[in-house]
Each structure stands twice: as structure tokens, then as C-alpha cells.
Image (spheres, helix red, strand yellow):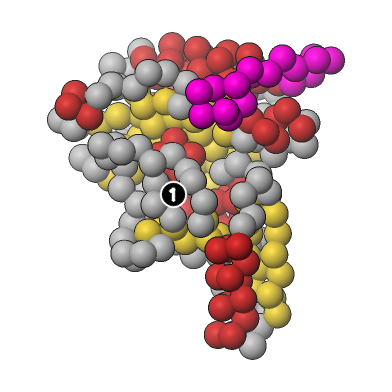
Amino acid sequence: MIHPDLLFYAIQAAIAAGDSILEIYRQEDIDTLSKVDKSPLTQADLASNAILMEYLGNTGIPIISEEIKNESYRNRKDWEECWIIDPLDGTKEFINRNGEFTVNIALLTDGKLQLGIIYVPVTGVLYYTHTEMTASYTYLHAGNLPEFEELLENSEVLVPNKEKKTLKVVGSKSHMNEATIAFVEDLKKKTDREIEIESLGSSLKFCLVASGLCEIYPRFGPTMEWDTAAGQAICEAAGLQVLNAETQEPLQYNKEDLHNPFFIVN
């Protein structure tokens, strides 16, 4: 269990970071750079990262982020807890101005996810976990953020739904590949339910499954720990699993190699 004040502070950090992203998103031109791995980088990524590093740095808990030079595993392996953040998940969606990008924050304690927050700056939709990881919630943020008790009262519990006539599979808008298509074809052989595929950017795919709007999210493409930690926390707190596609074990974090294996959410 984490303290409610820590959760609320992290929520405030996510919203502040989202506000900084929106300021740049609303500009007429968006300058784009390329990282060493050829993935895009914008001023919004950097602005959001700076805010999250300041907010979360105040907690004294070390941070793993997409936008910093992370500590070596020799230093990280003995951390009892750490933040895992993606300041702007879905940079391609940001550049394409489709609104499907998020701010992701997760807290890992003794190897277990204890907190997950996903904030969607364009819509103001906030997803977050219960302090005891026993439920996940969604809240529509507009204007001033209320105090934590009022926030809880006005949030809706996420309820996954596997009883629908149509089995909806959500896939990556940028990484729909042959392996994913083969997975869907195999599903068709195992069920008599109609199957539909939805494509969406960023960690919003986790939120669709946790919300019951989709049922399965297979990912047979590259991801990093900061891409999935918050989404996995939200799904696990909602009663779902995020499993290594090969071993059927939950994804692990703060590993020596921060790359994820392929995985399936259901």
C-alpha cells in the first residue's frame, strides 16, 4: 500500500506535465529532432520530462525515464523502489496531432508495481490505481484538480468486460505487424465470437482493455519499461494480467535490459 498523499502528488505531477505538453501541442509548428535510435523527439518530451523530474525528484525516490541517461544496472539493482516514467508516450501521435498521447507514471517497490497513472492531455482523461492496487479509476479532469477525497468520489471504477458478443482486439497504430495479424487469425480459430480490431496509439491501449472497451492487447513489437509500467499497473489493479507472450509470467521491471519481451494483456 502507498500513502494517498504520494498518489495524489504523482497525479498532480502528471497533470502539470500534461499542461506543458499542451502548450507546445497548440503551437503552429512543432520542431522535431531524432534520437540515436531514429525515434522522434520534441520540445514537449523534454518539457514534460523536466516537470516530472522536478516533482518526482522531490520524493527522494530514484527515477527511470525515457528522456534521461539512466543509472547503470550496477547502481539500479539495489534500489528498493523507483519511479518509471514516460513523459510523452506516443510522440508520433503528438507530431501527427491526433491526441493519442499520454503521460505515464509508475512506482515500483520491491519489484512490484504499486502505482500507475496515465494522463491524456488533450481530453483531460486521467487513469490511476487504488492505493492498495485493488482497483483502477478514470476521472475527467477539467479546470482545477479537486482534493483527493473529492477526486475519488467523482472517479469511475474501471471494469474489464469479457462477456460481450464481439471480441475486440486492440493493436498499435504504429506497430501493427505480421505477428499480431497471425495472433488474431489464431484467435479466430479458437472462438466463434466475432472479432474486431481497433488501432490506437500510446499506453491508451492498456486503458481500453482495463475499461472493458477492448478485451485483448497483443504486443509483438519493441517496447521499453517506461512504455508499459503504468499501463500494467492499471490493468493489474483492475484484475487483468500483462504476461510475457513466451513464458506467461508478468512483465518485470528495473531489469538490467530495460527492453520488454513481447506480451499479451487480457
**Up/down of 11 relative to 247, above or below:** above
Res. 236 image quadrant? bottom left
Q: Total marks drawn?
A: 1
Label 1 Cα crowd, 10 Å radius (few <14 / some 14-19 / many 20+)? many
Magenta region includes residue 28: yes
| Residue that carries the numbered disc 1 in the rendered image | 232
Decide which of 129, 50 is in the foreground and name it.
Answer: 50
Q: Position of residue 140 (x, y in %)?
A: 67, 38
Direction right: furthest residue:
28
Q: Mark 1 is on which residue type?
A: Gln
Magenta region includes residue 216: no
Decide which of 33, 55 is in the foreground and name it.
Answer: 33
Q: Quadrant where the N terminus lies?
A: top left
Q: Position of residue 16 (x, y in %)?
A: 58, 18
Residue appearing at x 66%, y 45% in the figure = 174
Res. 191 image quadrant? bottom right
